[in-house]
Each structure stands twice: as structure tokens, then as C-alpha cells.
Image: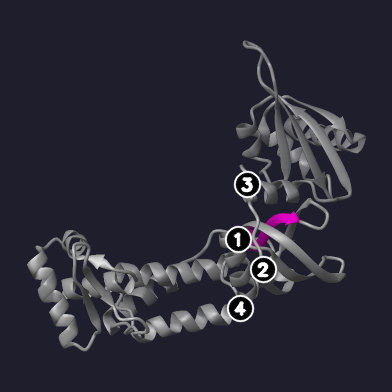
Amino acid sequence: MPRPIARVLTLLELLQSGGLRTVAELADRLGVDERTVRRYADHLIDLDVPVESVRGRYGGYRLAPGYRLPPLMLTDDEALAVLLGLAAGRRGGLTAATDTAAETAAAKIRRVLPERLRRRLDAVLGSLAFTAPPPGAPAAPRAPVLLAIADAVRHHRPVWIRYTAADGRGGDRTLHPYGLVAHAGKWYVTGVDPAIGEDRMFRLDRVAEARTLPGSFEPPAGADPVRRVLEGLATAPYRHRVTLRIQGTAEQIHTRLPADVAIVTEIPSRPPSPPWSRVELRVERLGWLPGVLASLDLPFVIERPDELRDLVAALADRLARAARA
């Protein structure tokens, strides 16, 4: 594409982002002088693009309100980024609504690409493989639910939701939402239930309906939605509650026991004493823990339950017999 034409299209992209752009700003972004910017704007006007000129000290160019923008024109890198993003989003449960929406979006993009570029991108997507599937089936939220809650988060507005819990019980809730978190193929919203004043966390795929409510709220300083989700998953009610002391830092322990599985609290110590940490887990099964503790290769003390001690001892006996054999 000749450089002047490419710069005219770049000017259109800049104006498409909305608002008033000064001539000086556009000249700097395009790498040309201000006179050339005006000439490029005239080219767009000749193509029936309604570019408005605003005079004055802070004048510049903008697109007329309500103008229906032409189809996007993507470079090779941009097209690849969009299609890979759609593929990865479907894989990780990060696309809202259904897989159909991601498929139709990708199909529309591919349809308008030049044949040469389409073949190259198909080669990439056809040869792409993921190392491991996400745990369980991705649980995508409904698009209207995601958009309504995201708007409430951004503008600090209460939101009403219709929610179905894991046990099948349904009900209506009001939430002051602090943030959205995508984790392990699922979407979560965290916040406070103003009726009871308690922190809450909801899976968005279990929200059937959501709408913002009048009013506003002020999120507390230091609110951390990611930490809230990870701690919520780590402390969810399970069959066994495990407490350990491990000689190591939180960073070392999280290499084998991630934050959504274990809560790690470092125990204060004075050098040269080695650091110890208290580790708490809630698990449905204990059978996998002895192997993980062995892989940490760090001294540890089991505080509870006694059943875990028996499993660790049994693993040690099996390893010792295998070594002797």
C-alpha cells in the first residue's frame, strides 16, 4: 500500500477512536507536517467521510456524530492477533455468551481478508495446539449479564442479579460490585452485599439476569478482586481441612500449591533461622497431597488431619521399597 494512502487510512483510524483531535497531535502521530494533515483530511472528505473541521486555538478534526464507520481494515499482525485472541478465548472460557459468537466473529473476519492472508492465517490456526485443556468445561457468562455487571463495576453502581447457587437454589441479590475476574475457565464478580454487609463472590455463568440500579457507592481502598476470588476458592467448604507448617517461603510453596488451592502465611522468624510458613487447604480428597509435598522437597509438619500422616507414611514406605528393589 503506498505510504500516503496508508497514512490517510491511519488518520481515519485515529478519528474513529472518537473525540476531537488537534492538527498538531495528528501530525505527530502520522509523522508529517500540519499542512499534510489538512490535505489528508481533504482526501477523506472527497471519499464522503464526514470529517468536521473545528476552528480556533484548540481546533482540529473529528468525525460527524452518528456516522456509520466503514469496515475495519486490518494489517497482517492485527488480523492474526484478533483471530488468535478468539481461539484462545474460546479455549479458556473467556468469550462471553456462546462459542457460536466467537465462531461467527472469526468467520466474518476471515471472509473479508485477502486470499493470501487468509491462507497464511489458516495455516497458523490449523497447526496450533494447546498444551493442556482447561479444567472442566469453560463456563461462559451471558453477554448481557457480563456487560451490565462490567458497567456497574466501572461506574460504581449497585447491580441486581438473579442467581442460581451450586445446590440449585435460586434467588435475587443486590451487590456493590468491585471487579470481574476470569480464572480457570470461569468468570467471577466480587463485591459486598449491602443488605448484610458481607463480602460476596458469584460465578457469572450462574447469573441468569443482571441490571444496574440507581445510586452509587464508593469501593473500599485496597479492594483486590483477584485475591478475593483466589482466597474464596481456597477456603470453599470441602471434606477435609488440612493445616501444615512448611519450611519455605510463600513463593516456593505456591510453585506446587497455587493460591486458589492453598492459603500460605509466612511465620515471622529471625535470621539465620530458615523461614517457615503455615499452609491451610480445604480438599475433597487427600490422596494427591503426599506426592505434592514430596515434590516440594522442603521439610514439613502435618498439624491435621491424622489421615494425611498415614498417607504420607504409606508413600514413604512405597518409595523405600521401590528404591531397595
Which quadrant of the structure image shows residue 275?
top right
Q: Magenta segment: does it hold 157?
A: no
Dot in front, 1 or 2 = 2
Precedes in sequence: disc 4 or disc 1 = 4
Tag 4: amino acid = Thr
Going from N to C along the chain, the mark reached first, 1 or 2, is: 1
Q: Nearer the viewer, residue 53 or 34?
A: 53
Residue to which mark 3 is pinned: 224
Residue type for callout 1:
Val
Q: Residues within 10 Å of mark 1 (few under 14, many from 20)?
A: many
The amino acid type of the residue labelled 3 equals Asp
- Name the secondary structure under disc 1: helix
Name the kind of residue labelled 2 in the image. Pro
Please name the residue that numbered disc 4 is placed on.
98
Give the residue number, with chain letter if any, for mark 1.
Answer: 153
Marker disc for residue 139: none
Ranked by sequence position, the earlier of labels 3 and 4 is 4
Coloured how? one colour
| Left or right of 106 in this view: 254 | right
User: Which of the two discs, 4 and 1, sits closer to the camera?
Assistant: 1
Q: CA distance from mark 4 to mark 1?
A: 23 Å
Residue 304: where, in percent of width, then height?
88, 33
Q: Residue at x 51, y 66 (%)?
A: 88
